[in-house]
Amino acid sequence: MTDSRAQSTYQVRLGWGAAALARLAEADIVVVVDAIGSPDELAAQAVGLAGRPTVFAGSLRNATATANAVFREQLDRGGRTAINLVLAGDDGEFAVEDYLAAGAIGDALSALGIDHSAPDVAVAAEGFRALTRALKHLLSASETGLRLSADGRRDEVRAAAELDAETEATRLA
C-alpha cells in the first residue's frame, strides 16, 4: 500500500521541511515556502532532487505571482502537473507564517483551476482566506516574528506580511 503521507493521489500537496522532500510523492514542481527568512538550504535540497523538478521560492509577498508561474509551467508541460508545497518552517517544524503563505499560494492556485489539493493544502488555503486581514498581526505575533522583532528586525517581519507586494515569481531551477 502507498504511504498516505506521500499524498500521491492529489495534484497539490503540502509538507514540512526536508522530511517532506523525501516523503511527498515525486512532483514536477516544488514550491519551497518561507514567509520570513531565506529558504536557501531547503531550496538547494529541492533543486537536487532526483526527478529534477522546477523549483520556486514562495512567500506571502509573491504568492499570486508564484501561483501564476506554476500555472504557466503546467501549461508549458501540456498536462496536469504534480505540485509539492514544501514549507521551510522553523528548523523544519511548524511555523504559522509559512502555513499562511502556503495557504495564500494554494488559494491562488485554486483560483486558477488547480484545485485537486490534499486536505493539508485545503486547510491552509481556508485558514489563509479567513485570516487574510490579520496577516500583519499574525506574523508579528508568531514565534518567528517575536524573535526577529526582539533582535531588532521588526521591519523584516512587517515586510514579510505584505501580501503580493512582489509581482514576479522566484524560480530557482
Image: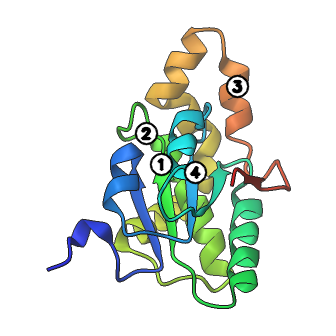
Where 107 sits versus 99, above or below?
below
**Going 35% across and 77% down the picture, which residue do you hit?**
8
Q: Secondary structure at mark 1?
A: strand
Label 3, on which residue?
156
For marks 3 and 2, the one nearer the N-term is: 2
Label 1, on which residue?
87
**Going 66% across and 16% down the picture, which residue do you hit?**
153
Closer to the eye: label 4 or 2? 4
Q: Secondary structure at mark 3?
A: helix
Query: Dots 2 and 1: beta carbons under 8 Å?
Result: yes
Identify which residue, 103 or 127, lies in the foreground.
103
The span from disc 3 to disc 1 (Cα, nearest Å) is 19 Å
| Left or right placement of residue 65 versus residue 74 in this view | right
Q: Secondary structure at mark 2?
A: loop
Label 4, on which residue?
47
For marks 2 and 1, the one nearer the N-term is: 1
For marks 4 and 3, the one nearer the N-term is: 4
The span from disc 4 to disc 3 (Cα, nearest Å) is 26 Å
Closer to the eye: label 4 or 1? 4
Query: Where residue 58 sits: x, y (%)?
Result: 64, 51
Query: Dots 4 and 1: beta carbons under 8 Å?
Result: no
For marks 3 and 1, the one nearer the N-term is: 1
Closer to the eye: label 3 or 1? 1
Query: Where residue 143 sits: x, y (%)?
Result: 44, 27
The span from disc 2 to disc 1 (Cα, nearest Å) is 8 Å
Label 2, on which residue?
95
For marks 4 and 1, the one nearer the N-term is: 4
Which numbered circle lies on residue 122? Answer: none
Q: Secondary structure at mark 4?
A: helix
Q: Tell me how many marks there are.
A: 4
Q: For residue 145, say whether it is visible.
A: yes
